[in-house]
Amino acid sequence: MHMYLVVAGTLVVVLTAGFGIAGITTGWVLPLGRHRILRPKLWGYGQLVGAVGASLWMFLGVFPARLDALALIGWFVFMGGIGIQMLAQRPGRAPVPPATSSAS
């Protein structure tokens, strides 16, 4: 049973990282959330950061007490990835138009 969980966790992390790389390179987002994502590249970075954090949390969290800090760091990195994904759903800053001088 343990091997099934490891394989399923690995598959989820690899797919998440793959979707993140696709979002970064091409701007492609899964059709499920396409209507909410305003900045797909930032979404891809969030996916990639989340995948790294999840892999640290899942795969290093099972080792002895010496590596407990890495599992905790992985959890915080995963939450940071979710935060980046939330920022991708908000509009970015609009560029400020150049000021025109009206010197007489």
Image: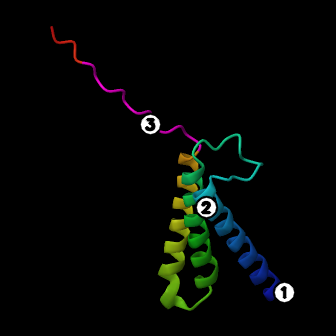
Q: Residue at x 78, y 77 (%)?
A: 8
The residue lying toward the viewer, choosing from 34 and 5, is 34
The residue lying toward the viewer, choosing from 90 and 78, is 90
Q: Secondary structure at mark 2?
A: helix
| Side of 30 where 96 appears, left or right | left
- Name which of mark 3 and mark 1 comes first in the sequence: 1
Q: Where is residue 82 shown, x and y percent of the image?
A: 58, 56
Q: Where is residue 83 shown, x and y percent of the image?
A: 54, 53
Prevalent SS, magenta region: loop
The relative height of residue 99 versus residue 78 in the rendered view (above or below) is above
Q: Secondary structure at mark 3?
A: loop
Q: Are marks 2 and 3 in contact (CB under 8 Å)?
A: no
Q: Which residue is mark 3?
A: 93
Residue 64: image quadrant is bottom right
- Name which of mark 1 and mark 2 comes first in the sequence: 1
Q: Secondary structure at mark 1?
A: loop
The relative height of residue 47 versus residue 85 in the rendered view (above or below) is below
Task: Calculate the distance from the C-alpha at mark 1 to the C-alpha at mark 2.
Answer: 28 Å
Q: Which residue is mark 1?
A: 1
Residue 20: image quadrant is bottom right
Q: Which residues are magenta?
A: 89-100
Q: Are marks 1 and 2 in contact (CB under 8 Å)?
A: no
Q: Which residue is mark 2?
A: 47
Q: Where is residue 36 shown, x and y percent of the image?
A: 67, 41
Q: Amino acid at mark 2?
A: Gln
The relative height of residue 38 versus residue 50 in the rendered view (above or below) is above
Task: Calculate the distance from the C-alpha at mark 3 to the C-alpha at mark 1.
Answer: 48 Å
- Name which of mark 2 and mark 3 comes first in the sequence: 2
